[in-house]
Each structure stands twice: as structure tokens, then as C-alpha cells.
Image (spheres, grey):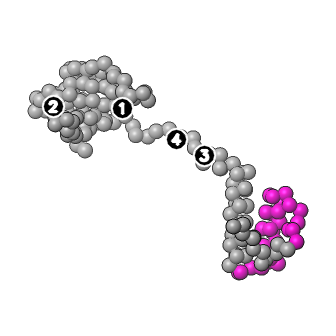
Amino acid sequence: MPKIKLTITQVKEVQKIGDKGAEKLTFKAKNLEGKELWYFTFRKSLFPAIKNNVGKEIEGDVETTIREVDGTTYTDHKVTQIYVGGEAVATTKQPPKQTFQVYRDSPEARASIESQVAFKGVIDLLVAKIITRDDPFAKAGIAWALEKFGVKEIPSGRGEAYKPSRVC
């Protein structure tokens, strides 16, 4: 998007939009052709650069869109960036958000996930008949699962060929 030069002629008061705290700043400016148009931005970090430059020329990125409402055509001029001395006023870099991933990085959580994945791998190998219950991996996996379920030993009659009965 090319930078355009605008001379700010009028700035309205900040307008609250919706119920989530969005704010919109609308201003009038002349473009290089001398045409005076209304512009707006939702980027709060641009507000001071607009308010403090009434009567002055700024450089900015503008997205122009056309929309139709009830048969009337509207042209919107949304300012997405302003440059002062060639440098962008608003940076796109935002602070990292704290997410669930932070919890998963704890040593306890990591060990738990690793154990679960290893157990799943052992079960997959048993089901595919690549290993038997006598294999050290199978014994370790079964012991881990028994401990997790609080079971001291596998109930009799539930060996390798055990198939649960269906209730119909």
C-alpha cells in the first residue's frame, strides 16, 4: 500500500464504537489533489499523531473501500499507519499473550505428556502385535497404566486376548 500525503484540516472527538471498548477517530484532510475527504482510524496509537498535526501534512497508509447500504454507495478511507520522519508511528509488534502453552512447559506437565505418549505407543505396538506382553516396553507401559488407575494387578481372565463384552 503506497504512502499518501494528507494535510489535516479538522479532527472530531474520539467516538466509542460497540460495547467492547473500540474507539474511532475521524478527521478531515486534503490529499495532494486538494480534495478534502473524511478519514478514520481505529488504531489508538495513531490518535496523537492525528490530533497534534491539525493544519500540518502527514504521510500515511490509507485503505479505500466502497460499500453499498440501502442503495447508497459509501467510500471509506481508513488510515492504517502514519509515518513521522519516515518512521511508522504504530508498530505491529504486540506483547506476547499468555496462553495454555505456558502451563504445558512446566517440567511436571512435560513429563506427564511424555509418559502418556509413550504409553500410547506401547499400546499401539501391542495391538499391532509387534511386541508381546512379555516385552520390557509392554511391561513398563502396563505397570504405568496400572499405577495411574490405582490397580495392584491385572484382574484374572483379562490377558492379551481379552475382549470386553458388549451390552446390547
What is the secondary structure assignment of the residue under circle 1? Answer: loop
Cα separation between marks 1 and 3: 28 Å
Estimate the spatial distance between the alpha carbons at disc 4 and disc 1, rounded to whole Å.
18 Å
> What's drawn in magenta, residue-wise?
129-156
Kindly report which numbered mark, 3 or 2, lies closer to the viewer in this rendering: 3
Q: Which residue is mark 2?
A: 31
User: 14 above or below 87?
Assistant: above
Give the Cα separation between the discs numbered 2 and 1: 21 Å
User: Number of marks in the image?
Assistant: 4
Q: Which mark is residue 43?
A: 1
Could you give the CA–CA distance between mark 3 and mark 2, rounded to whole angstroms?
47 Å
Name the residue type under label 4.
Answer: Pro
Say which element carries label 3: helix
- Picture residue at 82% right of the left edge, 78% below the top: 134
Give the percent coordinates (x, y) of residue 18. 38, 28
Q: Residue at x 82, y 75 (%)?
A: 159
- Outermost front residue: 168
Query: Given contact means CB atoms under 8 Å apart, are the residues at marks 2 and 1 in contact?
Result: no
